[in-house]
Image: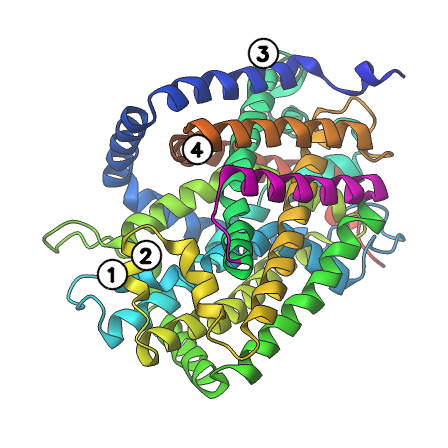
């Protein structure tokens, strides 16, 4: 089969054209576009705050039901087959895909947004506001978000590894519900194009937001100015590393990079604890976990409906984050399904619930604890830096206060760059698998296709970073979550229906 036959242009080209068509007017009229989109999003937040909060809770309950009911023991593949990856490798890949690059960008400073705009009745900048900040950072990377990420995976994994369907697509998973006419017709195409639009736009945003993690630290370390040329160089290095990883394949690429980075991230965390204010960090971590557990229901469901002055950052950002996470749910679910051959439904869901949550809480505790310590004890006006939109500049400033600060910055950059590489690799792997015409139950997506997709995403991101348009596209990514939520619930229904039809809980289980 020629290279042209490896990709389904009927869904890829329309999705790419839609992303470009959306991006052009945003780039030309960034300020007006952002104002319009934010007003639309604010209206949705005002009307459906309660809905997004319950959406997260419902998916956690659905995940627990699928895990501990008869469906949880269903094996995604041959029951006699061993899982493709060890539990550590599997968890590392999910962590690298699920939160790695973002936690490096937000972990040290997410608390500041809450400290500046705390819940009703709490004074900004107070000790209570700071405790709310780190507890909220942990809450964001908790059970609701990872339930959003993983709950389409049972349906996608089932069609791929059990029913051995050649195409790993949402339209294929819906076949048991809506029939051949829908899946093979315009309805299925719309679902598949919607998936690709959400992923391509989200990937461009992630690339654009991810590069400054490295550029700001590199500029600080080398005492040079931050320019678009520096961003371009960092991005080229990033894409080069990805290309090597893509060429090596998932076993030697994503798996090895993900497991290596878990050790490097662990080394960075231990360095910060032992070289920095370790006792304070451990105490603050304990306080944050205690505060989170005590206020978990409040964070999960509170809308501040009876308080004057509108919602605080906690309420408005939770809705945005859940909506933005819904956009990424398709990517995470399809990728998790692809790498979960040999795992039970229960193992897949609970690993995604627990492993990324645990690591995100530890990372937030260490990075956030270091940021809070510098704020409280070193007279570093971090809250003002963040208010002035200099968030990325604060990270190297904080790291440089450690003994051997240059080493901390260097290690931070390496870990961030590898996480960014595995994120891009996982994204392009998923898009390539989704658009490929190869039988995905038997083959891997073509390496050349993954590199082509990475090049397209990179060009879109760099153009938007250069001429403007990235912030509006980020809001669009959040808005894309609305239709994705509907598809999520359809696919949960599809997974249960397929397992019931096949009586998989009797015949496709480990003996």
Label 1 sits on a secondary structure element that is helix
Residue beneath disc 4: 470
> Considering the image in quadrants, where does the N terminus appear?
top right
Residue beneath disc 3: 186
Residue beneath disc 1: 116
Q: What stretch is highlighted in magenta?
A: 223-249
Q: Position of residue 80 (x, y in %)?
A: 90, 53
The residue nearer to you, when weighing 128 against 416, is: 416
Q: Where is residue 84 in the image (x, y as percent from the top left)?
A: 83, 52
Decide which of tag 2 and tag 3 comes sooner along the chain. 3
* Position of 8 relative to 360 (above/below): above
The residue lying at 60 percent from left, 26 percent from top is 177
Circle 4/circle 3 CB separation < 8 Å: no
Residue beneath disc 2: 386
Q: Distance between the residues labelled 2 and 1?
A: 9 Å
The rendered magenta stretch, by its main secondary structure, is classed as helix
Q: Distance between the residues labelled 4 and 3?
A: 30 Å
The residue nearer to you, when weighing 13 against 337, is: 13
Label 2 sits on a secondary structure element that is helix
Decide which of tag 3 and tag 1 comes sooner along the chain. 1
Residue 377 lies in quadrant: bottom left
Number of numbered discs visible in the structure rendering = 4
Residue 292 horizontal side relative to residue 17, left or right = left
Circle 2/circle 1 CB separation < 8 Å: yes
The residue nearer to you, when weighing 476 against 260, is: 260
- Select label 2 or label 3 by which is in front: 2
The residue nearer to you, when weighing 244 against 315, is: 244
* Position of 133 relative to 317 (above/below): below
């Amino acid at each position: 089969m020629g290279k042209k036959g490896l990709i389904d242009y009927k869904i890829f080209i329309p999705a790419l054209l839609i992303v470009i068509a959306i991006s052009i007017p945003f780039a030309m009229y960034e300020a007006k576009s952002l104002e319009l989109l934010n007003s639309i999003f604010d209206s949705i937040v005002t009307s459906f705050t309660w809905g997004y909060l319950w959406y997260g809770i419902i998916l956690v309950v659905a995940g627990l039901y699928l895990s501990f009911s008869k469906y949880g023991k269903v094996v995604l593949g041959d029951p006699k087959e061993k899982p493709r990856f060890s539990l550590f490798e599997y968890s590392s890949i999910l962590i690298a895909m699920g939160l790695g690059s973002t936690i490096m960008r937000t972990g040290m400073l997410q608390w500041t947004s809450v400290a500046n705009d705390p819940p009703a009745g709490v004074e900004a900048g107070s000790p209570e506001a700071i405790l709310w900040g780190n507890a909220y950072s942990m809450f964001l990377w908790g059970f609701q978000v990872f339930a959003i990420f993983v709950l389409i995976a049972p349906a996608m994994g089932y069609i791929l590894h059990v029913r051995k369907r050649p195409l790993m697509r949402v339209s294929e998973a819906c076949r048991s519900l809506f029939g051949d006419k829908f899946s093979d017709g315009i309805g299925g195409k719309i679902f598949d194009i919607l998936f690709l639009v959400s992923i391509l736009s989200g990937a461009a945003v992630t690339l654009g937001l991810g590069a400054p993690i490295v550029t700001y630290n590199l500029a600080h370390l080398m005492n040079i100015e931050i320019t678009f040329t520096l961003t371009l160089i960092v991005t080229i290095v990033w894409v080069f590393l990805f290309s090597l990883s893509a060429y090596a394949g998932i076993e030697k690429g994503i798996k090895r990079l993900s497991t290596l980075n878990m050790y490097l991230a662990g080394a960075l965390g231990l360095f910060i604890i032992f070289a920095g204010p370790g006792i304070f960090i451990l105490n603050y971590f304990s306080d944050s976990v205690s505060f989170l557990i005590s206020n978990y229901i409040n964070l999960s469901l509170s809308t501040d409906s009876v308080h004057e002055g509108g919602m605080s950052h906690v309420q408005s950002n939770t809705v945005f984050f859940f909506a933005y996470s819904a956009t990424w749910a398709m990517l995470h679910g399809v990728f998790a399904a692809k790498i979960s051959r040999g795992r039970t439904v229960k193992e897949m869901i609970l690993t995604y619930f627990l492993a990324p949550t645990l690591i995100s809480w530890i990372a937030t505790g260490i990075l956030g604890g270091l940021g809070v310590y510098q704020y409280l004890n070193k007279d570093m006006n971090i809250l003002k830096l963040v208010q002035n939109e200099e968030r990325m500049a604060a990270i190297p400033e904080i790291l440089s206060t450690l003994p051997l600060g240059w080493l901390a910055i260097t290690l931070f950059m390496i870990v961030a760059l590898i996480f960014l590489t595995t994120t891009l690799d996982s994204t392009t792997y998923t898009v390539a698998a989704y658009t490929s015409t190869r039988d995905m139950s038997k083959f891997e997506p073509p390496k050349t296709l993954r590199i082509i997709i990475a090049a397209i995403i990179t060009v879109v991101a760099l153009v938007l970073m250069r001429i403007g348009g990235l912030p509006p596209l980020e809001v669009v990514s959040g808005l894309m979550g609305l239709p994705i939520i509907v598809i999520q619930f359809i696919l949960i229904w599809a997974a249960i229906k397929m397992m019931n039809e096949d009586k998989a809980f009797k015949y496709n289980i480990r003996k």
